[in-house]
Amino acid sequence: MMDAHFYTKCWSLILLLLASSVGAEEEGKLVEQVVWDLDNLESIGGHSVTVEGRPKVIETAKGKALEFDGEDDGIFLDAHPLAGASTFTVEVIFQPYPNGLKEQRFFHMQEREGEERVMFETRLTADDRWFLDAFIQSGEGNYVLYAEDFKHPIGPWYQAAIVVDGKEMRHYVNGKLEMKREVTYEAQTQGRTSLGVRINKVYWYKGAIRQARFTPWVLKPEEFLQP
């Protein structure tokens, strides 16, 4: 007859296989908070990068950052940092420069197959100010938060956040809520990310980006990164 020790070993093996299966399903999906420090041109968040143009690594008061010239500088990663998250907070620390394009796409995350995406964009005004344009495409829905009534001076560092709680999309600048709207959002699958430009290499960004953070739950403004 088989003893209790044999059955215990069998159950241990089964539990180990189940745990391995769950881990395989979660591999490459956002299941915990992840921080990307943009401090080099070789890798970001453990992902190798493809460099377009000549973005620079610069020193700032709070560490290194990447600087983009607004003409042909871009960074591309074969990773979608929000993949698998049905709720999320995505934050970026950035510094827009003057004399850039009127419309700039500076942080673009998109599925590998299809057009589902999450994007941070800036709009520059004639008096050297900017405002945030946050965009999500999910399924048949195109969701825009175009904050033209919330203009900011060009020059300082800023923190911008997009928050999705499953029913609503909100965006913040330096912890202050600017706009919100209802959304129907489904977790996106694996894909790509571009920094400093849209993935299809249009609407180049002139400025710097220092850090991004991705959280698979809703953060309160007091929990946000500081610029």
Image: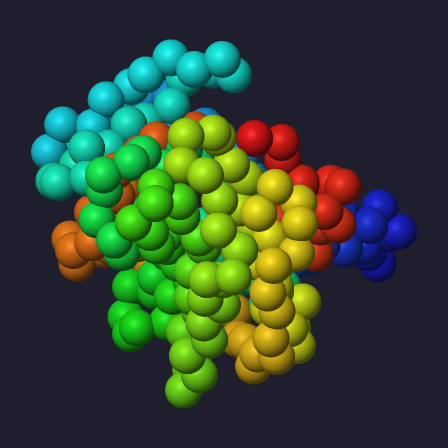
Left or right of 188 on screen, residue 91: right
The percent coordinates of residue 154 (x first, y second) are 40, 36
Residue 213 visible in image: no
Question: Which quadrant: the C terminus?
Answer: top right
The vertical placement of 227 against 200, above or below, is above
Residue 57 visible in image: yes
Task: Tell me the colour scheme of the image.
Answer: rainbow
The percent coordinates of residue 145 (x first, y second) are 49, 68
The vertical placement of 49 against 102, above or below, is above
The percent coordinates of residue 90 (x first, y second) are 54, 50
| Residue 112 quadrant | bottom left
| Closer to the camera in the image, 126 or 176 | 126
| Closer to the camera in the image, 167 or 29 | 167
Left or right of 188 on screen, residue 110: left
Residue at x 61% of width, y 41% of height: 174
Question: Which quadrant: the N terminus?
Answer: bottom right
Residue at x 61% of width, y 69% of height: 180
The tally of labels here is 0
| Residue 11 quadrant | bottom right
| Residue 146 quadrant | bottom left
Q: Residue furthest bottom?
A: 140
Residue at x 59% of width, y 65% of height: 179
Residue at x 53% of width, y 75% of height: 186
